[in-house]
Amino acid sequence: MSRQEKTILTVFALALVLSLLALLLWQETGSDEPEILHLSVLLDGSEETAWRNFRRGADAAAVEYNVDLRYVYRYENPGQAGQLQAMEAELASGAEAVAVAPLDAEALTEYLRNHSVLQPVVAMGSEVHDEAIAGCVAVDSRAQASLLAGAIVDSGARHCRIYLRTGCGELDRQRLEGLTEALEEARVVTDTAILGSGSLDWEPGIAAVALDAGTLAALAEKLPEEAPLYGMGVSGSVLELLEAGRICALAAVNEYDLGYLTLSAAAGLVSGRYQPPELLTPFLVTGEEMFDPPYAAQLVPMG
């Protein structure tokens, strides 16, 4: 065998050894495809349309972080018990983290403290301060209530009726507490009523308020046209009513950001990154202002 043939054979043997080593390394570490994260989002049982902007933001984050995302809108059993059962089912079926819009924050944190839940749980919407919660992306409900109370007071109303949906969640309770406190400080009389299937009690001179988008749209149908209507939460129906002037003022947040930041926090926690609490700043808008640049992109995001 010539010297040149020996050199070629040696190079070929080295190349073969390197190829085998590369194959073994690939089999050991897997392919270069990014890992798919499996996350679940448990909403508060309200209409799906009320979560449209939230879902846009969450879906955008899911694409960015390579997340297989599952939404749970309804529960087999009512109230917090049904939500906890749904959370158990999602975690048992392989969810690596769960984001929850708590119906009852105290019950949720108590459950997490008393059970060995290894996956991160992120609270969204309402503020939940408890070490059992791995992350929190919340609305500044006190600031939101203060903005809406200011609009009601500026209108000259001296009596305000706050309408609640059946089975309201933790965010509704936080908004109710903040709004009642702000209105009472301004010496506005407040009372509450439950939105039902029948007619609603209302008298002239009373400002009507809803704490979520679904209730706000329902009030617009049930109350007479002259009833001054205020509220929180965004949906397609609410934006149409705001544009038409049926809603006097709306205290809202960028719900696209709420969805995006919630999914980003959950994905980060699964990857082992600390996620500091996020608190979204609300804004007050009227029908005349809703298409102005500061508000339009937040009410109807392009994402």
Image: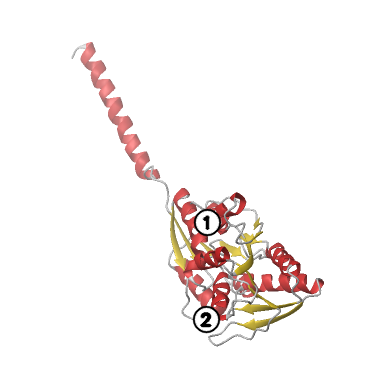
Nearest the camera: 73 or 84? 73
Residue lying at 54% horizontally and 58% vertically, measured from the top left: 259
Q: Secondary structure at mark 1?
A: loop
Quarter of the image that includes the N terminus: top left
Residue denoted by label 2: 78
Q: Secondary structure at mark 2?
A: loop
Rendering coords of residue 213 (x, y %): 56, 70
Residue 133 found in image quarter: bottom right
Rendering coords of residue 157 (x, y %): 74, 74
Number of numbered tags placed on the structure image: 2
Q: Comparing marks 1 and 2, which lies closer to the viewer? A: 1
Q: Is residue 65 visible?
A: yes
Q: Amino acid at mark 1?
A: Val
Residue 16 to residue 36: above or below: above
Residue denoted by label 1: 300
Q: Amino acid at mark 2?
A: Pro
Q: Is residue 78 left or right of residue 227?
A: left
Q: Is residue 228 left or right of residue 53?
A: right
Residue lying at 59% horizontally and 57% vertically, measured from the top left: 290
Residue lying at 51% horizontally and 55% vertically, measured from the top left: 57
